[in-house]
């Protein structure tokens, strides 16, 4: 049995169903990210796990115990908020010691726990400071230490990096992941940033309109998106419309291209949407491949993004910026090459 | 330059309008001894056992009113911000009613409902009458206390702090006492000092409930003595101003105010 089990969770606010028949099993020590756009229900699911929202239907089990109707303070769950939520009237040490104090731990034991947690987050000397005397990154670290100080069964992170600047975000997400692995704590991380979700998680749940559109490892989610929504939300993507020739081929703007998988069971002439990652396409000036015309070239530093007109459709492709090869000029005739494996046949959302 | 002169003139006229009567009253209070300025009137007032008794009584009533006000207003304002924001305008309207309805109407209502022949004869006993005046004062102080606390709550993220405390295992009592109240403490103190200033000089409730507080004492003094009432008025002003100064000081030097600056 899974350590954290969400079964048929539903949540409605008035007539609006925000979460629809949501199922998920998370193993002990697993790091799972909920990824999706605003309003997709990811935070609502997290808040139901925390106990801040009561599910309309469904059950939440932690380590086999049904906690669906338990109050938030009875669940032994640690939570880190986007807005830090440190108590402004308490020092860093008092903030971290708040949970152990509520739990009735002895004063000496609380002191030891606080010291241990502050060391864990790399701020052993800031115990006497108030939250307003810390930077955003430091405050979020303290919030993490405070959540971990109660030794929670599950750690919930509600967009904890959103309020931080880009550099700190990257370093802190690495720290969070390292801490999570070190402590082996089951963690749910809510984010709308695909890079965060893909780089930190054991599994990613891509959410769309209150449902889990796809659950899988970051590699699976990125490489084999199951639906048009997942494909378009995770990474940049070309969506191409064509029609089926047979189980291994399709026609794209009158040109026959091989497709490795996904066309089984589809009839000849049936319309089909395929996705193609920009980095899967390579550019040649002559030889084989699909003939197109360069529409625009955008220089993004390490990457050059080229848009190529291919019949009625436009394909975006990314290539590394190499000093030996100059990017093509707009209007130049080019050839596009990609493998049969790179065309992903998408299901309906 | 011309605009600046006008501003200075307006401020000067305003200051004269406000301070001249006070200066006149203060000067008059110093003339009890013929031919010399002295603090004789203040000595007489402060040495009067009746002053000490009524002032002490009013101070106790003011402190109890503050405690009652905090107990009623802080949880109410907190809960409304947290769970019932839609009824906030209604509650604000209710808390403003004591400014619209004169105290004499409220106290007559109390006397009519809680007189000795009613089902709850509070006016029939010393304790009952004191409870009645306490409730009356808490009502009178509602507009100030509620507004002060609500303003304080607006400056913190009530919902997230509550959820953070809940996730750490805290129940409602602990959340209110250790998270919410300390963070609105300066606001509560502002409301408390305003309440103190109102209760100390209150006359209508005390006179109609026949209680010997500082307000009726000031009126009695005013109708029977010459110089002492001026001294009393100056003392009453000093108390009010001291309260205001304390609010400013606490707001200025509080840790949280520094954080917000």
Image (spheres, rainbow, N blue to C red):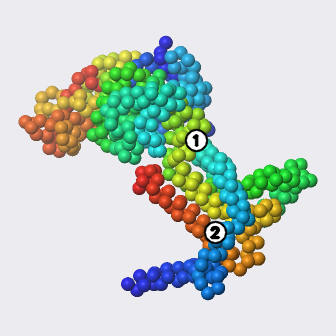
What residue sits 34% from the left and 28% below the top? A120
**Position of the C terminus of chain A by quadrant:** top left
Chain letter belonging to callout 2: B
Q: Closer to the camera, B47 or A243?
A: B47
The outermost residue toward the left is A324
Chain letter belonging to callout 1: B
Q: Are marks 1 and 2 on the same chain?
A: yes
Q: Considering only vertical position in the picture, is A224 above or below B62?
A: above
Disc number for residue B236: 2
Could you tell which of marks 1 and 2 lies nearer the N-terminus?
1
What residue sits 60% from the left and 37% below the top? B172
Does the rendering let one see residue B119?
yes
**Lateral position of residue A180 relative to residue B71, left or right:** left
Choose mark 1 or mark 2, whichever is in front: 2
Q: Considering only vertical position in the picture, is A327 above or below B94?
A: above
What residue sits 40% from the left and 33% below the top? A144
Residue A133 in percent (x, y) is at 37, 46
Residue B134: image quadrant is: bottom right
Q: Considering only vertical position in the picture, is B60 above or below A81?
A: below
How far is mark 1 from mark 2, CA to CA? Answer: 34 Å
Q: Closer to the camera, B19 or A313?
A: B19
Mark 1 Cα shell of 10 Å, populated few (<14), some (14-19), many (≥20): some
The outermost residue toward the top is A1
**Lateral position of residue A18 relative to residue B96, left or right:** left
Residue A278: image quadrant is: top left
Does the rendering let one see residue A8?
no
Mark 2 Cα shell of 10 Å, populated few (<14), some (14-19), many (≥20): some
> Which residue has dot 1 on it?
B176
Residue B189 in percent (x, y) is at 57, 54
């Amino acid at each position: 049995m899974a350590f954290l089990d969400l079964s048929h969770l539903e949540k409605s606010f008035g007539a609006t169903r925000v979460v629809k028949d949501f199922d998920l099993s998370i193993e002990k020590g697993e790091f799972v990210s909920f990824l999706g756009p605003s309003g997709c229900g990811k935070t609502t699911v997290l808040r139901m796990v925390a106990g801040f929202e009561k599910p309309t239907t469904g059950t939440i089990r932690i380590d086999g115990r049904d906690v669906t109707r338990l109050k938030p303070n009875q669940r032994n769950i640690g939570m880190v908020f986007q807005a830090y939520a440190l108590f402004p009237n308490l020092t860093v040490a008092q903030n971290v010691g708040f949970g152990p104090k509520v739990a009735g731990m002895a004063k000496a034991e609380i002191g030891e726990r606080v010291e241990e947690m502050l060391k864990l987050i790399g701020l052993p000397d800031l115990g006497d400071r108030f939250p307003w005397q810390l930077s955003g990154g430091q405050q979020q670290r303290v919030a993490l230490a405070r959540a971990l100080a109660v030794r929670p069964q599950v750690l919930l992170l509600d967009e904890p990096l959103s309020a931080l600047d880009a550099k700190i975000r990257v370093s802190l997400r690495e720290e969070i992941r390292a801490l999570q692995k070190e402590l082996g704590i089951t963690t749910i991380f809510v984010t709308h940033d695909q890079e965060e979700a893909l780089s930190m998680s054991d599994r990613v749940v891509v959410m769309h309109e209150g449902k889990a559109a796809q659950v899988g490892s970051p590699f699976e989610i990125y490489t084999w998106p199951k639906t048009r929504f997942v494909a378009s939300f995770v990474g940049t993507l070309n969506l191409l419309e064509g029609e089926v020739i047979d189980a291994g081929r399709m026609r794209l703007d009158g040109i026959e291209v091989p497709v490795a998988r996904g066309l089984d069971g589809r009839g000849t002439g049936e319309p089909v949407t395929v996705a193609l990652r920009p980095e899967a396409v390579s550019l040649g000036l002559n030889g084989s491949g699909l003939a197109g015309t360069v529409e625009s070239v955008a220089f993004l530093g390490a990457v050059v993004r080229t848009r190529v007109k291919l019949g009625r459709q436009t394909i975006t492709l990314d290539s590394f910026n190499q000093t030996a090869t100059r990017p093509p000029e707009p209007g130049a005739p080019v050839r596009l090459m990609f493998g049969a494996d790179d065309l992903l046949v998408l299901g309906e959302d | 330059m011309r605009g600046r002169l006008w501003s200075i003139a307006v401020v000067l006229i305003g200051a004269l309008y406000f301070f001249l009567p006070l200066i006149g009253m203060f000067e008059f209070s110093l003339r009890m001894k013929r031919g010399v300025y002295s603090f004789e009137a203040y000595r007489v007032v402060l040495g009067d056992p009746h002053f000490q008794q009524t002032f002490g009584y009013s101070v106790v009533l003011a402190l109890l009113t503050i405690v009652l006000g905090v107990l009623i207003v802080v949880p109410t304002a907190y809960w409304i911000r947290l769970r019932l924001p839609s009824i906030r305008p209604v509650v604000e309207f209710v808390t403003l009613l004591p400014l619209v309805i004169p105290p004499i109407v409220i106290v007559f209502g109390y006397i009519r409902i809680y007189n000795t022949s009613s089902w709850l004869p509070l006016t029939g006993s010393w304790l009952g009458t004191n409870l009645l005046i306490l409730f009356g004062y808490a009502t009178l102080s509602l507009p100030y206390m509620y507004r002060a606390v609500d303003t304080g709550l607006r400056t913190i993220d009530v919902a997230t702090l509550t959820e953070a405390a809940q996730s750490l295992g805290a129940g409602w009592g602990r959340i209110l006492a250790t998270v919410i109240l300390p963070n609105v403490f300066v606001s509560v103190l502002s409301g408390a000092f305003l309440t103190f200033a109102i209760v100390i000089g209150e006359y209508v409730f005390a006179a109609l409930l026949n209680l010997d507080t500082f307000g009726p004492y000031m009126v009695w003094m005013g109708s029977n003595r010459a110089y002492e009432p001026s001294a009393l008025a100056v003392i009453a002003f000093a108390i009010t101003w001291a309260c205001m100064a304390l609010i400013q000081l606490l707001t200025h030097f509080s840790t949280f105010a520094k954080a917000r600056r």
